[in-house]
Amino acid sequence: MSLPASLKSRLGLPLIAAPMFLVSGPALVKAACRAGVVGSFPTANCRTVEELDCWLADMNDDLERTADEVGRAPAPLCPNLIVHRSNTRVPDDLAAVLRHKVEMVITSVGSPEPVLKPLKDSGCLVLADVASVRHAEKALAAGVDGLVLLTAGAGGQTGWVNPFAFVRAVRKFWDGIIVIAGGMADGQAIAAAETLGCDLAYMGTKFIATRESLAKDAYKEMLVKSRLDDVLLTRAFTGLETNMLRPSIAAAGLDPDNLPVRGSIDVAKDINASERDRPDAKRWKDIWSAGHSVSGVADVPSVAELVARTAAEYETARRPSVQCV
């Protein structure tokens, strides 16, 4: 199954504004959809199912108004269901997603199988986050419509595989939808992903540094000032490999070069103690993530401005080069 024509025709760019914990909110999602890219968000960003219902109703109303204003349907919104067995809200979040008749869903951190049948029965397109070939095979066996390949360049909880090798390995046994996640810094990267064999690309870090994101201003400013070498791969905070910003770790009173090799940092012991020693140290919630594309963050534009710039870069990259004879 390739990207449905009905969806492809609504996209100005083959791009998904990635779902980011505590960053992707209604303003970002709506702006992305209006600009012609899929707007996604983790349902866990809503504190309650009732809040999720409000978010989805608001987003759907905005998309309908946009369609009336411009005379065509905008890009779809796409909730991200975290299907790990520890997430007790999965059944209720799934019910909310079904009530609001969403067109696309991304599943992550676990097997999509428990939510797949009701989503498919509703006509929803289901993409699954995977970080290995084995996970990809399992998700396809469950019946998903597409795969989001989480590669080494992704922010937050990241993959470990080189994107070139990962895409080509999966294309050997899957001719359906592939989305690449990790290191998408500009339109040139999106064009390269298409050449590699991808249908869509995830872009996350650059959307954090937009005016509509829920990220704190200090977080956005840190992204502007940071470069690739400021991204640290560590298991110290979650027990899983995560790409984090070194300056934010240092600002919390911790030494980025002397973190535990594996296992969660004890927030009460390690971070709160550092706050007592350093009054200016920030709390756990101010230790921030970023992907390898952080070097591409130069300012804090609106979502519309970011998408327009990325579209121009993409078109330039796809334009045949002129060869002098």
Image: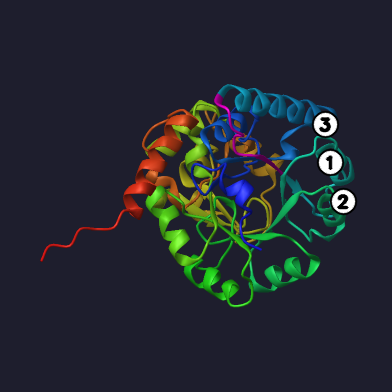
Q: Which amino acid does label 3 sit on?
A: Thr
Which residue was labeled with disc 1?
98
Residue 214 visible in the picture? no
Q: Which of marks 1 and 3 is nearer the N terminus?
A: 3
Classify 10 Å Cα crowding around label 1: few (below 14), some (14-19), many (20 and above): some
Quadrant showing the N terminus: bottom right
Residue lying at 17% horizontally and 62% vertically, measured from the top left:
323
Q: Which of marks 1 and 3 is in front?
A: 1
Q: Where in the figure is residue 5, as x and y percent of width and height?
A: 60, 51
Name the residue nearer the viewer: 291 or 195: 195
Which residue was labeled with disc 3?
48
Q: Where in the figure is residue 102, as x and y percent of width and height?
A: 75, 40
Q: Could you tell me how far apart the alpha carbons at marks 1 and 2 are, in whole angstroms?
A: 8 Å
Q: Where in the figure is residue 217, as x and y percent of width and height?
A: 50, 26
Q: Which amino acid does label 1 sit on?
A: Leu
Quadrant showing the C terminus: bottom left
Give above or below for 171 relative to 278: below
Residue lying at 66% horizontally and 49% vertically, measured from the top left:
265
Give above or below for 218 relative to 238: above
Q: Nearer the viewer, mark 3 or mark 2?
A: 2
Q: Is the magenta stretch mostly helix, strand or loop?
A: loop
Q: Is residue 72 part of the magenta span, yes or no? A: yes
Chain part drawn in magenta: 70-79
Residue contact between numbered discs 1 and 2, judged by CB atoms under 8 Å: yes
Residue pushed farthest left? 325
Q: Which amino acid does label 2 sit on?
A: Pro
Which residue was labeled with disc 2?
118
